[in-house]
Image: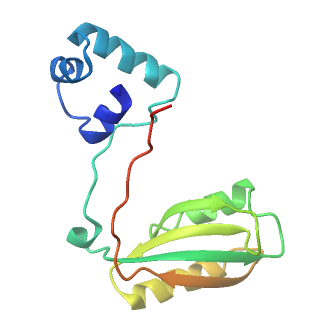
Amino acid sequence: MLLAELQRDATQAYAALGKAVGLSAGAAHERVRKLKEQDVIRRTTVEVDPAAVGRGVAAFVLVEANAWMGDAPVRAALEALPEVVEAHIVAGPASLLVKVRTATTEDLQAALRRLFAIDGVTGTQTIVVLESFFERPVDTRP
């Protein structure tokens, strides 16, 4: 319940957080500190509307490769592409699944060219998002 409340609004004061989950402010603060130490809470951030900041085009790209894509050079190459907002090693016909956000379809095409230039990449299959119904935080209930 604490994690769900933090995902809903991580900016609230510990007193408000504690009240929402039945803890004192001090106990809420201590639990959050421990969750950070245990890397359960990786970071505290804000959710930004991609379209409002010029990143309204979303696409999922399956990346095919002739080499293992889980090594440091590939990770560094993906991290160097600001359009790539998620990257996952996957099982199946593709080696990677990446989520890309750009301003235009022309920018998407340029990002795909840069993805294709990564050593070992042999092909891509792109699925352009027309509309997103929702994106939800991780369900922390047991």
Q: Is residue 31 left or right of residue 126?
A: left
Residue at left 73%, top 68%?
95
Front residue (pair 7, 141): 141
Front residue (pair 132, 141): 141
Compared with 26, 62 (above or below) is below
Residue at left 16%, top 22%?
16
Rendered location of residue 27, percent (x, y): 30, 9
Quadrant in the rendering for residue 52: bottom left
Front residue (pair 97, 85): 97
Q: Is residue 102 left or right of residue 77?
A: left
Quadrant in the rendering for residue 91: bottom right
Q: Quadrant of the N terminus?
A: top left
Q: Is residue 119 left or right of residue 20?
A: right
Rendered location of residue 99, percent (x, y): 50, 68
Compared with 53, 38 (above or below) is above
Rendered location of residue 71, percent (x, y): 75, 56
Compared with 38, 80 (above or below) is below
Q: Is residue 92 left or right of residue 17?
A: right
Quadrant in the rendering for residue 12: top left
Rendered location of residue 10, percent (x, y): 26, 35
For this orientation, the residue located farthest to the front is: 142
Residue at left 65%, top 83%?
124
Front residue (pair 22, 9): 22
Identify the colour scheme used.
rainbow
Residue at left 25%, top 8%?
26
